[in-house]
Structure formats: structure tokens, C-alpha cells
Image (cartoon, rainbow, N blue to C red):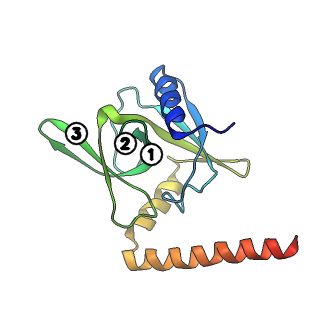
Amino acid sequence: MNINNVELSSLAEHILGEGFNLRFRASGKSMQPFILDGDVLEVEPCNGRVIQKGEIILCKTGERNLVAHRVVRLEKFDNKKSIFLRGDSNLKSEYIVFQEQVLGHIVSIMRNNRRIRIASTSQRLLVMLWNTFPPDLRKLYWRFFNFWEKLVRFSFRQEN
């Protein structure tokens, strides 16, 4: 069943607000290479827990838009905690959200019938390594990744 972002936002707000976990299929490429288009994300409510730099949170940005992005920094303005988010594939653009916009945090990803725990040591090390790459190296990676993706799609089309 496919639902639009407005419906997913309402559903997520209700389910996570009641204290239950939520699973949904991610769409988009902003969190590559760690979250791929079509991965199933498991979200757990924050329940007052402190948000930390490096984790991936699900929040509302605007009236009913949802985004799952990584926390890149936390700051306080006028006694209000500001949370700066960025997609892993984005080099510069950031969202700024506040605590009341946060619905939950991503705890795992389902990909190819395999569960990947976000808080595992290997995942944290991969993210730390990725974040040490200079922007030019990340751009090179994305050029190669996009080329590779097109090549794979083309080769599958040729076989069918």
C-alpha cells in the first residue's frame, strides 16, 4: 500500500506519539550510502531521550513533510535546542528543526531481508569514516556511484 507524505506524517505522529515503533519504506537518495531508496526504516519514539549528534532522526519539516536525516550539530538559541540535520549524500544543505518537531529516531534498516542496526559499532565507524572524507572525495564517490547505478540498470535491461 502506498501512502503520500501527508498521510505518512499523520500516521507517524499518531503511532510514535502513542509510544509504538513504526516501519516505513524510505524514498529518495539524500541518505545514501547508508540508507538507500526502498529500504525499510524502523523508527522508535524518543520518549524524552536526549538526541545526540550522529544519530538519524525522523521529524516534521513544515506543515506535514517528513524527513529522516542525520544530526550534524546541536545548538541552543533563546533556551530552545536547535537540531541541525543533513542527509549523508548532501555536502552542504542542512535543515534546522526543534525538539517538538522530532517524532523518533531510526533504530534499524531492513535491506534484502537483512536487518542493519544503526547503533552498531560497525555502523558508527562507517559513519565516522564517511564524515572524515573531504567534500571533493564525496563528490567523486557520488559521480562513480551514479555511473555504476546507470551501468547496472543498463546491463539488466540488455539481459531481459
SS for callout 3: strand
The three-letter amino acid code for the residue at tag 2 is Thr
Q: Is residue 76 left or right of residue 65?
A: left
The three-letter amino acid code for the residue at tag 3 is Lys
Q: Is residue 79 above or below residue 92?
A: above
**In the rendering, at what x and y percent does residue 143 appear?**
53, 78
Point out the image quarter for the C terminus: bottom right
Nearest the eye: 60 or 72? 60
Q: Is residue 121 left or right of residue 74?
A: right
In the image, what residue occupies the spot 64% across and 51% down?
Answer: 38
In the image, what residue occupies the spot 37% across and 42% down?
Answer: 61
In the image, what residue occupies the spot 48% across and 34% down?
Answer: 9
How many neighbours does mark 1 have within 10 angstroms: few (below 14), some (14-19), or many (20 or more)?
many
Q: Is residue 93 left or right of residue 110?
A: left
From the image, tell me which residue sits under label 3: 81
From the image, tell me which residue sits under label 1: 67
The three-letter amino acid code for the residue at tag 1 is Val
Q: Is residue 108 above or below residue 91?
A: above
